Image (cartoon, rainbow, N blue to C red):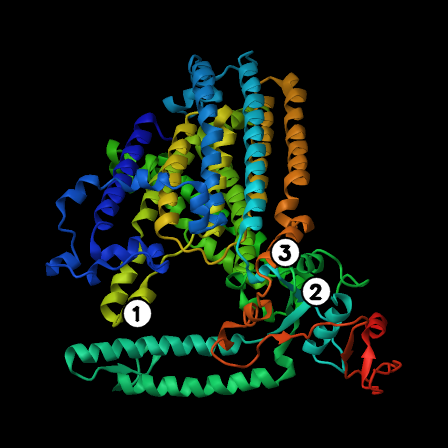
Amino acid sequence: MATIYDIAVGAALNVVTAVAFLLLFAFLRLQPINDRVYFPKWYLKGTRASPASAGATVAAAKYINLDMRSYLNFLSWMPAALKMPDDELIQHAGLDSVVYLRIYRTGLKIFVPITILAFAVLVPLNWTNDTLETLKVVHSDIDKLSISNIPYGSKRFIAHLVMAYVFTFWTCYILMKEYQIVAKMRLRFLASEKRRPDQFTVLVRNIPSDPDESVSELVEHFFLVNHPSHYLKHQVVYNTNKLAGLVEKKKQMQNWLDYYQLKFERKAERPTTKTGFFGCFGSDVDAIDYYKSEIEKIGKEEADEHKKVMKDPKSIMPAAFVSFRSRWGAAVAAQTQQTSNPTVWLTEWAPEPRDVYWNNLSIPFVSLTVRRLIIGVAFFFLNFFYVIPIAFVQTLANVEGIEKALPFLEPFIETPTIKSFIQGFLPGLALKIFLILLPTILMFMSQFEGLVSHSSLERRTASKYFIFLFFNVFLGSIVTGSALEQLNTYLHQSANDIPRIIGVAIPMKATFFITYVMVDGWTGVALEVLRLKAFIMFHLKNFFLVKTEKDREEAMDPGSICLYWSEPRIQLYFLLGLVYAVVTPLLLPFILVFFALAYVVYRHQIINVYNQRYESGAQFWPNVHLRIITALIVSQLLFLGLLSTKGLEEATPALLALPVLTIWFHKYCKHRYEPAFVRNPLQEVMRKDTLERARERNFDLKAYLADAYLHPVFKSNEADKFYVADDPGAEPVIVPTKRQSRRITPVQSEDGGSGRLNLMESVHER
């Protein structure tokens, strides 16, 4: 079990490592050769020029900063990251990025007052007792600061009960204020945002089949009849996964060709490669000729597949992007049921074009339920079997367990410095390593479920990751860790005393979580600003592939926030802080350091580095609010269970009121603020439409939306442009049809022809 000395050694290691990363970043960011690694966002915006092309007088100045005075201000990036106002930051990086930063600010607002109160009131009450000595459980001096050191049935627990109420009310107050602020920010952002294709477009899925009409014709007829004054155009969805794979493969071959051509130019010697697996097996061939022939072969396959997609009706999926003449028309279509059958003609707001996950649009809608069931079962078993590595991590936190499993290491482990390293640093590092691949696995599972936008994929993956962290990292560590540490005590106590022993032991697991917070929250955040992976990859590409400035720009990897793993990690800190605020307040300062450091680092990254792939308008905030509420309720229930082992059963009714009040508070916020994140108010979209019509009377919306939702593989071709509807004209709407399977009375047109039908009637029959 970790002692104060062990925690101090772990803290020293993490502080030294984090400071080393920050100093190394401060040095590397000043070097001209690294400018595109640490400031890619400004290059993408076109407001920053490469120092290497700025005409440096000294050749070395293209790569190394020779201005010694700039090194005196090597930490200037920290205050600079805090200077940009939120309104300017929204214009610069988008609302998603700014609201993401508010999660860290919310953590600081919640935990700074809680930490001050806990250390002023609870820590002295916990310290001035000797309960752990009399109980003879395994403990250290650090555990004397926890609630475990309060005597059984003591009136001192009343102070903890009062603090639980204070912490709950304060947390709810901050959450309500933040929800209100973010909701206003979202509505203001939507009202002031520039015109975007997704504001006029809905995604229609599960379009019913018709033997007489194609999907495109069916969509055209349906919306001309049911939205005659607002329907503008539509884009059917094609199954282009194979074609997209060929395009990507051709791009990879082109990269290899560029590499070998550049190599030939440098060495004046024809390079060779092997034709087998990854260029490691097979016969040697001329690399340039080989990749030229491969590109030509793939190009022919791509052309054939393109023709097949365009001609084969089976390539057209029962889905379409439908655009309207106004935001109001799109809002009505997206937020209403289209037919009496609620399982067909399903509409939802279309993701913005950058946000569309094209691979999943080709998945049949009817298979989504089965896919989600499969993933639900797989996720359950993943949680279940991950208990094994979590238990292994807990053995690392227990020196006695290691010595029993590996007795020959006992003399080495008992060395004071090694023992402190094992207990104060190694458990957190091991847990961090075990969790590295997990977000990628969960993202793959979400993709299999069939979600059609990057933002929804990230939100779904974030939910899975949080559930995993809660059950395995939090509950799993507490249960397995306390069982391993107190096993000898359990075996020598009566069965009636075991719940009491568990109640004492659970608060002691705060030492394990302290080691994890230091490794992940301190060192991990400092490593994020260093961008080690992006640094290495950029310089490898720059050396082997880059020939032009355009190549150098493509070699940049600005990255993004990666909400699917970063947001659940923050929520774990909220959970730990709220659970241990009353139980073991010593954890709180470590969490505060994380929130403060992460806020500065990620603000800098958002300003200078990250280039978000999409803009959802902060749609993830309701999930953030829900998870903090969940953490709050869990903390209340665990505290209730803990007090029941402390001889304070009469406090149960008072504590039961807390989760009830918290749930009521969540329902209030959900009804009051969440609609702003789900639906667009018709009043607001009508106002925006009216203003735009007054300001831009001659704006060509058809041309603006012409290829907004065209699949990227078609963007270089003329095929498959949006179908554009003619102006509806007089009512009722008369459109051509090929339908022969139903008996419908022809309607004579003005010129006496009968080749058109009144679809006001025909569609209602359908």
Horizontal side, residue 759 vs residue 618: left or right: right
Tell me the quadrant of the picture where the N terminus can be found: top left
- The residue type indicated by label 3 comes to Asp
Instruction: Find numbered disc 1 in the image and state the secondary structure of the residue it sits on.
Output: helix
Using a 10 Å C-alpha cutoff, classify the residue at mark 2 as few (fewer than 14 neighbours), some (14 to 19) or many (20 or more): many
Residue 485 sits in quarter: top left
Disc 1: which residue: 551
Q: Position of residue 120 (x, y in %)?
A: 44, 16
Q: Nearer the viewer, residue 440 or 528?
A: 528
The residue at 10%/58% (across/down) is: 58
User: Residue 324: x and y, percent?
Assistant: 66, 65
Foreground mark, 3 or 1? 3
The answer, for residue 442, to whether it is visible in the render is yes
Q: What residue type is labelled 2?
A: His
What kind of residue is marked 1? Asp
**Labels 3 and 1: the sequence-earlier one:** 1
- The secondary element bearing badge 2 is classed as loop
The label number, if any, that marks residue 689 in the structure image: 3
Q: Does residue 654 lie above or below 673 as drawn?
A: above
Proximity of marks 3 and 2: CB atoms separated by less than 8 Å: no
Residue at x 40%, y 45% (from the top left corner): 431
Instruction: Identify which residue is drawn at 57% across, 50% down.
Output: 190
Q: Name the residue under label 2.
A: 230
Q: Quadrant of the C terminus?
A: bottom right
Choose mark 2 or mark 1, whichever is in front.
2
Q: In this view, does 187 lie to the left or right of 135?
A: right
Q: Rounded to the nearest whole Å, what is the CA distance between mark 3 and mark 2? A: 12 Å
- Up the image or down, 143 lies above or below 427; here it is above
Q: Give how far across and how far down residue 749 sits, in percent.
A: 83, 82
**Contact flag, marks 2 and 1 (Cβ < 8 Å):** no
